[in-house]
Image (tube, rainbow, N blue to C red):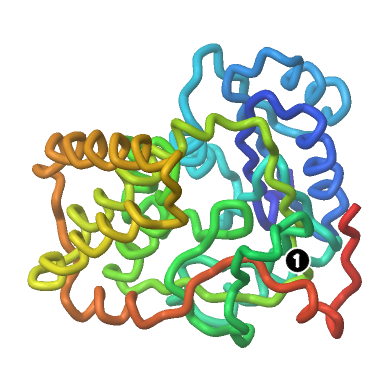
Amino acid sequence: MTLPEATVVITTRQRKTDLRKALESCLLQDLNIEVLVFDDASEDGTADMVAQEFPSVRLFRMQDRKGYIVLRNLGFAEARSPYVFSIDDDAYFSHPSTVRLALDAFADDDSTGAIALQYLEPKRAPKQRYMAQTPSGARVRSFVGCAHAIRVDVAKQIGGYREFLVHQGEERDLCIRMLEKGYSVKYVQTPPIVHNPSPVRDHSRLAYLGHRNTFLFDILNVPFPSLLWRFPADVILLLKHRITLRALPGRIANTVKALVACFWFLSKRDPVSAATYTAYSRLPMHGPVAPSILQDQVPVATS
């Protein structure tokens, strides 16, 4: 049996319709890939839909909820190729060449541990920011979970994602640890992934985890003396970010709960070197691109 050149991993829960579009785009990629779907105990018939409509997809059904970080780590274990591509269940490839072109970027440099793929969010609100214009091939700080690829051997070498993070911010935690080992994240202007964030999500839970994991990133990874200013700065930034009088009580409660929760993880502190942290801090961030910069690139289907 011929081994696949790449693996696409999708973790999903309760988003059957979105997932169908994601899988259709995966199976149109113009090279030999395998697709792995990890269904996190969905109750909407997701697993049955995948089994019936996409028999070539390797389906893993969870009887109990595990969380997508746990399932992404399982994806590294189950992959039969050297590279895992990850898109969200509410995203899709806009062109059949995306995976192939990203693999070319891996081949150029053995120190590339991961690829941050170009992605688009057509429904993004005008007030929200876009990624700064960054040349293809440039190093970036981290990748966003809905549009990236990672070398399986590198992921395993650094221990994969820290599963206690549960959700929110796990990518940058992995990427700074990757950088400490000498591997970088490269931004590549492939035909973009289209991400239409689903409204089916627990916003209050994500808000709390966003606070907690921002603080944990600092506590676990940031070396002294940088931690002495980075940690309080993040506390202040999260407290005041787009704050309103109505949101203030919940924002304060999340901050206090997150700070208390962090004490349980102090023993896991393993900061990177000062040189790594400085290099990481100076790199541009990954994010959705403004639609205007795609005019000279491959046409994108955004419907």
In the visual, does 42 lie left or right of 18? Answer: left
Q: Position of residue 206 (x, y in %)?
A: 46, 37
User: Foreground: 169 or 249?
Assistant: 249
User: Foreground: 58 or 117?
Assistant: 117
User: Foreground: 123 or 165?
Assistant: 123
Dot 1 crowding, Cα within 10 Å, few <14, some 14–19, many 20+: many
Q: Looking at this rendering, what residue extends furthest in the front direction? A: 245
Q: Quadrant of residue 129?
A: bottom right
How many badges with numbers are in the image? 1
Name the amino acid, label 1. Answer: Pro
Identified at 33% across, 75% down, the residue is 280
Identified at 71% across, 58% down, the residue is 124
> Does 191 sit above or below residue 26?
below
In the visual, does 130 lie left or right of 121? Answer: left
Identified at 82% across, 66% down, the residue is 97
Q: Quadrant of residue 41?
A: top right
Q: Which residue is mark 1?
A: 192
Q: Position of residue 276 (x, y in %)?
A: 25, 76
> Does 166 sit above or below residue 4?
above
Q: Position of residue 136 (x, y in %)?
A: 63, 83
Looking at the rendered image, the quarter that the N terminus falls into is top right
User: Foreground: 211 or 44?
Assistant: 211
Q: Position of residue 25 (x, y in %)?
A: 84, 49
Helix, strand or loop at label 1? It is strand
Identified at 45% across, 39% down, the residue is 246
In the visual, does 278 lie left or right of 187? Answer: left
> Does 284 sit above or below residue 77?
below
